[in-house]
Image (spheres, rainbow, N blue to C red):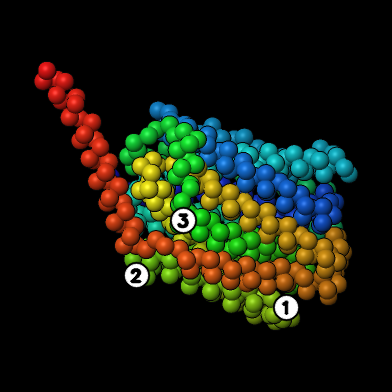
Amino acid sequence: MKLRLPQYLGYAAGDAANNLAFSMTSMFLLLYYTDVVGIAATAAGTLFLVVRVWDAFADMFAGRVVDRTMTRWGKFRPFFLFGAAPLLLLSVATFTVPSLGSGTTALALAYATYAGLGLAYSLVNIPYGSLASAMTQRPDERGRLASFRMIGTATTIIMLAFVVAPQIQRFKGNPEAFQQSLLATTLVFAVLGCALYLFLFRTAREQVARTVAHVSMRQSLRTLRGNKPLLLLCLASLFSLVGMFSLQTVQAFYARDVLGDANYIIVLTVLSTGAIFVVAPLIPRLVRTIGKKRGFLGFGALGVLAGVGISVAPPSVPAIPLFFFGLMGVALAGVNTLMWALEADTVEYGEWRTGVRTEGITYALFSFTRKLGQAIGGALAAYAIAFGGYAAGADRQTDTALSWIGHSAGLIPAGCMLIGIAIFAKYPLTESTFVAMVAETKARREAASARSSVPAAQGAQA
């Protein structure tokens, strides 16, 4: 059955809700920990590394839970219904640490609340990401779903910038007032997020046939072994995402300290994230014209250029770094949109090789690498600004500190994306091989169904 507009809008709403928790932490949690909670940048970097690696393993656990699940609502949809409120309330708790304790207690609470948020996020996001490959097998519709997903992501990220950036500027030097403002903000986000997840639940439909409803651990592992496209995609994505999350982690610092005004967060976010609204609608046509692999490589190369530009751009002329942030936005919009479509294709490859669809564990492994990218990128950024001598609460940072903030936003992303595209150059699936693979899998499924129906017919005749 062909997907209709409500399915696309519902899928976009799902990632808009996801990012009320995910992007809120990746954009503002380091600044919150250093300037409100009072955690040193190095300690915050270690916290990011530990908790986000934990999150990565939580993804694998969630993948197994999903693969074993089958209900009257389907395999994936129940998680949106029952997981939304716990996830969003844990997001509130993550941004209320000083209200619960201080000093060592605050650090312990930061670990506990952020780790709890990570587990809850895995149990909602893994089913969400797995859903696309169960909704359709058509490459153009998968490309369109990925585009709508990115539009949902971008809408939330830009909204976060408009809502949170003025609070950072207004309450600079007043952590208590900033804390109260964030509490009210995250509570509103919790209500909004629950409504968006409910819309996803009502509109999503799982339409792709499966021969095995409850997938065993052995079957899950068998589909992962030898899935070369998935492994190459994961490795390439890992490096690309280390760069992306390094930039995203320090973007608020870059605006406030390098450019001199926290309200520049809004401009940087609109430029770097708003590009999704231009790029995402073009992805289906791009896929038809040059294919996903060439598109991924091209956008990655553009990201390398943009990262170098951000690092060397003079902040005294804001228009120059703003231009390169916009260019980076185009690159990241293309790379991220294509990642989701490529991941769905690797599910088909796994089924083609083994005869079993394992959307949950396949997406979990991909998400595992995304969480590692977030862990390493966030930690690298925190360690870099600490190495540069960042001083929380200072009216002005030293030139060395400002330089290292710039490197975290520019050179780290450029170097990581260069490694990522070098790895992805070996990715084996093209559009033509994908179409042939899906057709062969369908023929096998139909032949197996015909064979199973023959004995039943013979028994009826007897």
Name the mark nearer the viewer: 3 or 2: 3
Residue at 85% across, 39% down:
105
User: Residue 233 or 175: which is nearer the viewer?
Assistant: 233
In the rendered structure, which amino acid carries the disc numbered 3?
Answer: Lys
Residue at 23% across, 40% down:
446
Q: Position of residue 117 (x, y in %)?
A: 66, 41
Residue count near mark 1 (Cα–Cα under 10 Å), binned few <14, some 14–19, many ≥20: some
Query: Along the polypeptide, which appears first: circle 1 or circle 2?
Result: 2
Which residue is identified by label 2? 289
Q: Quadrant of residue 155?
A: bottom right
Q: Position of residue 92 (x, y in %)?
A: 69, 41
- Judged from the image, the secondary structure of the residue bearing numbered disc 2 is helix
Asked whether residue 40 appears in the rendered view, the answer is yes
Question: In which quadrant of the rendered image does the C terminus lie?
Answer: top left
Asked whether residue 192 appears in the rendered view, the answer is no
- Judged from the image, the secondary structure of the residue bearing numbered disc 1 is loop
Q: Is residue 257 above or below residue 7?
A: below
Residue, far left: 461
Q: Residue 228 has which mark?
A: 3
Q: Position of residue 448 (x, y in %)?
A: 25, 37
CB within 8 Å, label 3 to label 2: no
Residue at 62% across, 35% down:
86
Query: Along the polypeptide, which appears first: circle 3 or circle 2?
Result: 3
Which residue is identified by label 1? 315
In the rendered structure, which amino acid carries the disc numbered 1?
Answer: Pro
Name the mark nearer the viewer: 1 or 2: 2
- Judged from the image, the secondary structure of the residue bearing numbered disc 3 is helix
Q: Is residue 312 above or below residue 207?
A: below
Q: Position of residue 363 (x, y in %)?
A: 50, 47
Query: Residues under labels 1 and 2: Cα distance?
Result: 38 Å
- Specify whether 356 is left or right of 383: left
Question: In which quadrant of the rendered image does the N terminus lie?
Answer: top left
